Amino acid sequence: MTDAPPTICPARPPRSLAPDLARGLMLLFIALANVAWYLYDRPGGIIGAHPEPGSVPDKVAQALMITFVDGRIFPLFAFLFGYGMVQFYTSRRRQGLSDKDVRTMLARRHWAMFGLGAAHAILLFVGDVLTSYAIAGLVVGAIFFRHRTGVLKWWLIIPGSLGALVAGLVVVIGILAGPGTMEPLDIAQSTAGEPSYVASMRTRTVIWAETAAVAGLFFTIPLLLLASWVAARVRLLEDAAQHRRRLVTIAVLTLPISWAAGAAQALQQIGVLTSIAPWTFTAWEMFVGPIAGPGYAALFALLATRYTDRRPAWVLAVSAVGQRSLSCYLWQSIIMAPVLSAWGLGLGGRLTTWSSLLFAAAVWLVSVVIADQLRRHGNRRGPFELLLRRLTYGGIPARAQPVTAPVLMPWEMPAGWMLPPAHAPGAPPPPSWTPPQGWAPPPPGWAAAHEATSVSAPPAAPATPVRPRDPAR
């Protein structure tokens, strides 16, 4: 009688609703934030896309949006996008796909998102973010995705601290400069307010070409990707119950600070804070406001832990939106653009801020109904998810045979296993190389399973399962 073979690939953990619920709720706030870009034929305000507030309900609505939503939900989008990159990579590797194939699929996925985002921006909505996230995924992912978690943390702490320091100095300069004037944005007027669809499309194309790469590679999105990778490697959202204390800490430390920065800009927008320069909090908002992205993700994950054992209908419906987040995101523009723009029905020229928010919420609710019906009928993906999947996989199989060696992610490789790049995994180390303490030759077949990366093989697999190294360390 022989011993049972060691466990090579861990069983896939049960699916958590936390990431999908976070994406579903995120799309509600995205709809609320985007609708302001369709309000034209009125003077522009000094903050974001909001028009100059008129009535008291408009002032209240704008103050709430600037404080809690604007500049905070798209960082959540970036955080969940980066989180999904790690989920995609690890799940495919554990399904038996090689490192090379999975990295190829990630690149294809980002190029497909770039194409969808470009079409979205040019045809419908000037504020598209898909292209910016795709560029960040391609460039920042190529540089940092395979680095150890400790390296990512240092790249988060040092640049983030320097950016916050510079933004704080700008605040001081703005306060000392005193009141002034600033030309309001006229993007809504030149896009949604343009009666000619072709003319509005030309304007959207120019704005998209000027801003997509800058937004994707600017300070904020790359840092959010690094933070999301650190979180995803320890399954912060999926295992929310185990990380409850950490999630509470993230929410408590990030959200109040971000909301305070938004509140200062809200007071400027509604005309309460007029004794300082209009641009005083702009840089501070760009560096401090986005920390609400991880904060909101932590808050929504904590909410999901309340429904681990029981799943009400509304939780399943909102999670269904999150499972089809790309389709539901594009759905918003497919409805809003022709209904609100001057080249369509022109409703954006008549709605106020508070009434436009009601319209945006209604658009999101319709997407909830549609996504929930797809879920009930067994359709796991929306139309754009199916298109993205087709473009991502190409000729690569969706699932392969289980690998015959432990599945170690690149960031789980201990530093002692690193070898010179010229050394082929599985081959004897060069004579000049001194193995680290405890190093052992790789087991047969390991190099073929891992397709010759620049790191050496781990020690030979023992006869009992080995707990992987904690990627958070």
Image (spheres, helix red, strand yellow):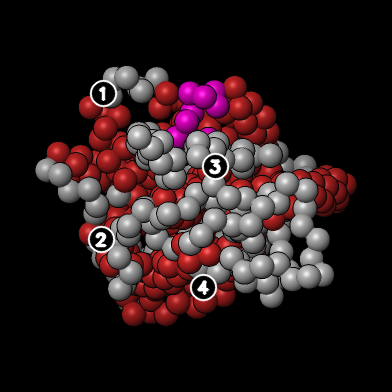
Q: Position of residue 114 (x, y in %)?
A: 44, 70
Residue at left offset 33%, top offset 69% = 396
| Up/down of 460 relative to 142, above or below | above
SS class, disc 4: helix
SS class, disc 2: helix
* Displayed quadrant of residue 394: bottom left
Residue type at mark 1 is Pro
Q: CA distance from mark 4 to mark 1?
A: 43 Å
Q: Is residue 382 visible?
A: yes
Q: Are marks 2 and 4 in contact (CB under 8 Å)?
A: no
Residues in magenta, as a range: 236-244
In primary-sequence order, the first of circles 1 and 3 is 1
Residue type at mark 2 is Leu
Residue type at mark 3 is Pro
In primary-sequence order, the first of circles 1 and 2 is 1
Q: Residues within 10 Å of mark 3 (few under 14, many from 20)?
A: few
Q: Residues within 10 Å of mark 2 (few under 14, many from 20)?
A: some
Residue 14 highlighted magenta (yes or no) = no
Residue at left offset 30%, top offset 36% = 318
Which residue is tagged 1?
Answer: 312
Q: Position of residue 144 (x, y in %)?
A: 64, 60
* Displayed quadrant of residue 17: top left
Which residue is tagged 4?
Answer: 207
In this rendering, position of residue 282 left or right of residue 391: right
Which residue is tagged 3?
Answer: 462
Which residue is tagged 2?
Answer: 386
